[in-house]
Every structure is written in structure tokens, then in C-alpha cells.
Image (tube, rainbow, N blue to C red):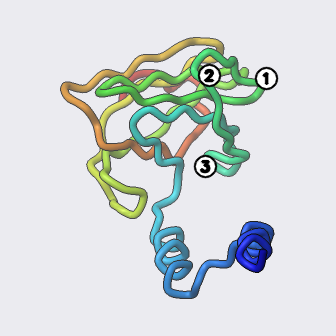
Amino acid sequence: MRLIILAMALVAAPTVLSPAIAEPAAEAAKDAKPGLFVKQGETWFFKIKDGQPADVRSGGEDEKPGGDELRVSLDGGNMIVLNGSPVAYNYQAFIAKKPSDKGNRTSVCTLIPGALMHEIWPGKLPGIRLTNFTEAGDSMGCF
């Protein structure tokens, strides 16, 4: 009987991370570079605020972005971005192994409103960081 009560108390107790476990997670977040880091198999939705992804949320590849959202997914060496906003954006992308890595800058093309953009690299990417979004205006192309 005591064992059952103890087990129930442990299940009902809130989970608290010890400082030794919580510190590496906080340190990793502190070291993360600006932008959105996308890992293999992930799909993210976001808006652009002050040149950076904001209001980031996860979702499915078949889900459409809201009126001012963008959707990005990474599968192998294929990154797919759907720009649901009315604004064309230029941005920078860095291939990296983890969010805290500077990574290697790679060329990407302007994200055209309402268009599905495919960026393809040979081989499977560990991850990619998208950052420094600017309104494209008349400056569209691949940079």
C-alpha cells in the first residue's frame, strides 16, 4: 500500500530539473546564433520581426502558413520555404551542425510572396540557420 501511495506521489509531483541539468540547456540557448535553426525533418512557421524569425511555431508540411507567416522544412539536402506573406524577402542561410555554430554561409534566393521555393544541396544537411531577413523590394535574385 505504501509503495502505491509513493508511486502516485512521484507521478503527481512536478518535474524539477537539477541545476546541473538546467545549466547546459540555458548555456546552449545563450550561445545560439540569431535566426531560426532548422534540423532534419523539422517544419517551422514564423513571421519576420526586426529582420529575424519571430512567433515561431512547429507544424506539418501539409499545413499552409497564415497571412504573414512563412513555412520552412528541411529534408535531406532539400529546404522548402513557402512565403505566405505579401512581402518578398532576401535573407541569409548558414549550414551548421547546431544552433551555436556559426556555420557556412550558402546562397539562397529571394522568397517571393505566395511562392514555394526549393533550395537544394548535394547530400544531407545537419541543419540550417535562417537569419537577417530584409524586404527585397526591387533587389530579387539569388545571393
**Is there a contact, CB below 8 Å, between mark 2 and mark 3?**
no
Which residue is more in the foreground, 88 or 99? Answer: 99
Q: Where is residue 63 in the image (x, y as percent from the top left)?
A: 67, 19
Q: Which of marks 1 and 3 is nearer the N terminus?
A: 3
Q: Is residue 16 above or below residue 42?
A: below
Q: Which amino acid does label 3 sit on?
A: Gln
Q: Residue 83 carries which label?
A: 2
Which residue is more in the foreground, 79 or 48? Answer: 79
Residue at point 35%, 23% (across, down): 78
- Crowding near pointer 1: few (<14 within 10 Å), some, many (20+)? few
Q: Position of residue 37 (x, y in %)?
A: 47, 48
- Crowding near pointer 2: few (<14 within 10 Å), some, many (20+)? many
SS of the residue under disc 2: strand
Which residue is more in the foreground, 71 or 23? Answer: 23
Residue that sits furthest to the bottom in the current view: 19
Q: Position of residue 76 (x, y in %)?
A: 31, 27
Residue identified by numbered label 1 = 67
Q: Which quadrant would residue 14 be assigned to in this image?
A: bottom right
Q: Is residue 64 above or below residue 43?
A: above
Q: What residue type is labelled 2?
A: Asn
Residue that sits furthest to the front in the current view: 1
Residue at point 50%, 26% (across, down): 139
Left-right relation of 79 to 63: left
Residue identified by numbered label 3 = 52
